[in-house]
Amino acid sequence: MLLLAGCQLAPVRPPSASLPDHYPADVVDPVGGPAGPRAATLGWESYFLDATLRGLIRQALANNHDLRLAVLKVAEARAGYDIQRADQWPTLAGTAQAARGRTPADLSPIGRAVTGNQFSVGLAASSWELDFWGRVRSLSDAALENYLSTDEARRATTLGLIAQVANSYLALGELDERLDLARRTATSRTESLRIFRRRTEVGATSRLELTQVELLSQQAEVLVAQLVQARAQQAHALALLVGAGSSVSPAVGHLDDKAVMAGLTPGLPSDLLLARPDILAAEHGLRAADANIGAARAAYFPRIALTGSYATASSQLDGLFKSGSGDWSFGPGLSLPLFDGGRRASALALAEVRQQQALVAYDQAVQGAFRDVADALAAQRGLSDQVQTLTRMLAMQNERTRLAQLRYDAGAVRYLEVLDAERDRLSAEQSLVQARRALLSARVALYTALGGGTQIATASSDSSQLLQP
């Protein structure tokens, strides 16, 4: 039986993972993308350089309700594991008993009524299963893997919250910059409207040109009002994430990649297997499913349990601990179901199906992680090219506006050409800010897709201690 106890009933197989050796060549090393360490070695406090953003992330990690629920689920899973692990040990209970009784004469062996006492103190062990087949150990291992999986889910929630705060902060910075551009444009057009009204009064320009200037000024005011509304809503969304007041304003006046985030190197696809919390959670889930198969297989073997007690007993209280007062019992038991209506077979089939589901979920998590990184790299490269192109376009639009104004002042063109140039310039300014913010969001997505940094603690740091019986 001791030799059979060493048999491994749970299937032992490494998780399958079909990942390419490298990311697609058309998305790696994006133009303008700063190089740096890998995400697994770069904590979020080192990756995000903006002090205000780091402060908001700290508030969110301390106050966010979704994260607090995730932490409580980890504590719940840990308690469940501790309960399951306790089944590997016998349950000892201290006992104490005092009784006084009378036996009538017709039942007494000496022919007369007897009144007596009985006192006892001792230890008792309830039914303790000798885990020859590893059933209890397999259930404990499954509980441990479920706990570790829950902790990885907590880490994924943490990483997702960091990304949400960062993206919300960047969106707020984008709206602030666009609002500043729109307000400056509105102020400039208000001044132009004042000048054209004066010129119309003295007959130096036509009423049509004045109407065109008024229309352009009103368009700028409408844009300012739209951006003010969007900015307020974004500030409220950020405040909800961090659990603080809504008076949140970015510290950067210009969305500059180097001022917000550090450089990052994607590394190899195989790195995802050790860094992505969703992959690690799926891996622990697969191991838990394997352990449940072992427990289901062990149910086919006999269960051997021990029950015993040791006490000292006496009819007199002062004789409890005298020589010869020992009272003990020992009762091993064996149980083997002969007929259960197919319950054990169904339980094993259920465990095997769930193991197959866990295997599919693991493969799905691996493939999804690879796509997330590839998409983030592609977005980073494409948006970097867009930012460079839009920067050149804005420079050309500024020159076009200057030349159109000179031609109008010289009387060579109508003011409509100046209006078109200013309209296109404002659109180019807004588009450039939006593209810069999208590029920064792509780099946030890349950081989260790569699994974040080591500063997000996981339960794996004390897993070796948990594995001790």
Image (spheres, helix red, strand yellow):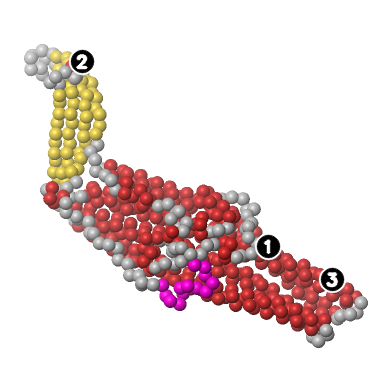
User: Which quarter of the rendering shows the C terminus?
Assistant: top left
Locate residue 401, reporting x and y percent.
73, 79
Does residue 272 lie above or below 454 as drawn? below
Tell me: 158 left or right of 318.
Answer: right
Q: Where are the magenta residues, as a range?
A: 23-35
Question: Would you name the residue on which mark 1 appears?
Answer: 228
* 32 or 194, nearer to the observer: 32
The reply, left or right, for residue 354 in relation to residue 419 is left
| Residue beneath disc 2 | 318
In the depicted structure, whether residue 236 falls above or below residue 78: below
Q: Is tag 3's residue or tag 2's residue first in the polypeptide sequence? A: 3
Residue lying at the far front of the rendered structure? 36
Kind of residue at disc 2: Asp
Q: Tag 2: Cα neighbours inside 10 Å, few (<14), some, or many (≥20)?
A: few
Quarter where residue 439 is shown? bottom right
- Tell me if 303 is positioned left or right of 380 in this view: left
Q: For mark 3, what is the residue?
A: 194
Image location of residue 59, percent across then percent down: 55, 50
Which image quadrant is residue 250 in? bottom right
Q: Upstream in the sequence, badge 1 or badge 3? A: 3
Q: CA distance from mark 3 to mark 2?
A: 112 Å
Which residue is depicted at the point 39% across and 72% down? 22
**Quarter location, residue 218:** bottom right
